Amino acid sequence: MRSMLLALFLSAGLAGAPAAHAETLAPPAPFDESVGVFRYPSGEAASRVVPLALDETPIQVWLPLEVEETHAARLLTSLDGFLAQLPAEHRAALRTVAFDPGEYPANARKARQLNQPELKLWASAKAGIIVFYRNTPPGDWRVSRRRVFHEMGHCLAHMRFGTSTPPPAWTEAAVADDTFFSDYSRNAFAATGTLVEDFADAYAAYMQAIADGGDALPAFQATYPARARLLDVYTGQAAIAR
């Protein structure tokens, strides 16, 4: 019930693109000889930087030197394809993607914080940077569209709001929709008192609905009407609709 959800927010002190975006892009740039030491969250590693030229300002992709070129090419192709489904204005929020050769250093703390003992983060983001983790070295990185879109939600929040925390209007929208966006966002809110993950989850689902077309976006709008109205503005869709 709405009164129950509102009580959660009060207790934490918080109350108060169309298909045209899927441009035809050049394939990922081939490997060059730009190498160096990159400081990943799990530690430093000799790495190669590859420019992903989706827009005028390429996104720098850092990969450990140990990664074979055929393997790296698959990762770059997947990343390129998912980012191509987002508007260029959103991609401007991303400067660097890094493939950490290790696991997320704070997995244990995060698992305790969210009361999910088996939780492992496969990606994280802050202002302009997305990092993918192996978690089971030397296993592979898990680059999926939903994961890329979720982390881009964090980057977009930093670009628009100056922080990963959405503005109070998002809290009001969540109360109006009378639900957390996902179990993950519910657990994150219980642990942190913020809707950081709620915004990223909602952004990912919203942009995926736009990319998929058909009934996907109307279904999102019907289920999360208040969030949808804000995302229309935050993502530029409201201007496009006019």
Image (cartoon, rainbow, N blue to C red):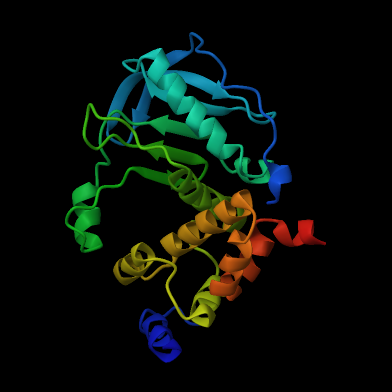
Q: Residue at x 65, y 29 (%)?
A: 57
Q: Quadrant where the N terminus lies? A: bottom left
Above or below residue 198? Residue 141 is above
Residue 42 image position (x, y, % from top left):
27, 34
State the residue in front, 211 or 55.
211
Q: Residue at x 63, y 54 (%)?
A: 210
Residue 136 image position (x, y, % from top left):
21, 35
Decide if residue 162 is in sight here: no
Q: Residue at x 39, y 45 (%)?
A: 124
Count the marks: 0
Q: Residue furthest right?
A: 242
Q: Residue at x 48, y 82 (%)?
A: 15
Q: Residue furthest bottom?
A: 3
Q: Quadrant where the C terminus lies? A: bottom right
State the residue in front, 210 or 83.
210
Residue 236 image position (x, y, % from top left):
71, 56
Residue 166 image position (x, y, % from top left):
52, 64
Q: Which quadrant of the view contains residue 85? A: top right
Relative horizontal placement of residue 154, taking residue 139 as reference (left or right): right
Above or below residue 48? Residue 144 is below
Q: Residue furthest front?
A: 214
